[in-house]
Amino acid sequence: MQTFIKPALRTLATLAAGLTLSVAAWAQSVDGTVEKVDAEAGKVTLRHGEIKSIDMPPMKMAFRVADPAWLKTLQVGDKVKFDAAKVNGQFTITALTVVK
């Protein structure tokens, strides 16, 4: 029985490592600049670089934010790094860091 378990575990570990690397490469942060903060709508407008994970070219666009508290910390002109995804059909910032 151990003859099958060890190779299977090795294969599973290899697949898990590959998946981890794939997810890390897929969810790379993007640079952006805050153009507008709309706390009432739960959105921030960013001028940003290419977002490969959602196949979006560089542009200026309003995004929903996963955590509305982030909007209280942002000011027009702030440089940010962020991750974005399509959540429930809407482009949403899922991680956000202000770059000092």
Image: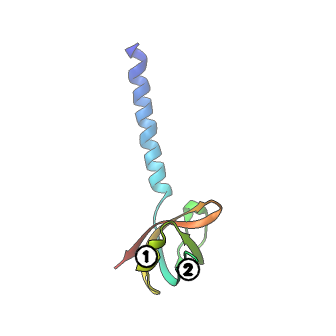
Residue at the farthest left position:
100
Q: Is residue 98 left or right of residue 45?
A: left
Secondary structure state at the residue bearing disc 1 = strand
Q: Position of residue 65 (x, y in %)?
A: 52, 70
Q: Amino acid at mark 2?
A: Glu
Q: Quadrant of the N terminus?
A: top left
The residue that appears at 63% across and 65% down in the rendered structure is 90
Disc marking residue 38: none
Residue at 40% x, 35% y: name it.
13
4 to 18, vertically: above or below? above
Q: Is residue 59 above or below residue 6?
A: below
| Left or right: 51, with 74 as reference point | right
Q: Quadrant of the C terminus?
A: bottom left
**Which numbered tag is attached to residue 40?**
2
The picture places residue 48, in percent across and down from the top left corner, at 53, 76
Residue extending furthest right?
Answer: 89
Mark nearest the camera among 1 and 2 is 2
Query: How packed is label 2: few (under 14 Cα within 10 Å), some, or many (20 or more)?
Result: few
Callout 1 amino acid: Val
SS of the residue under disc 2 = loop
Mark 1 crowdedness (10 Å alpha carbons): few <14, some 14-19, many ≥20: some
Q: Residue furthest top?
A: 1
Q: Which mark is residue 80?
A: 1
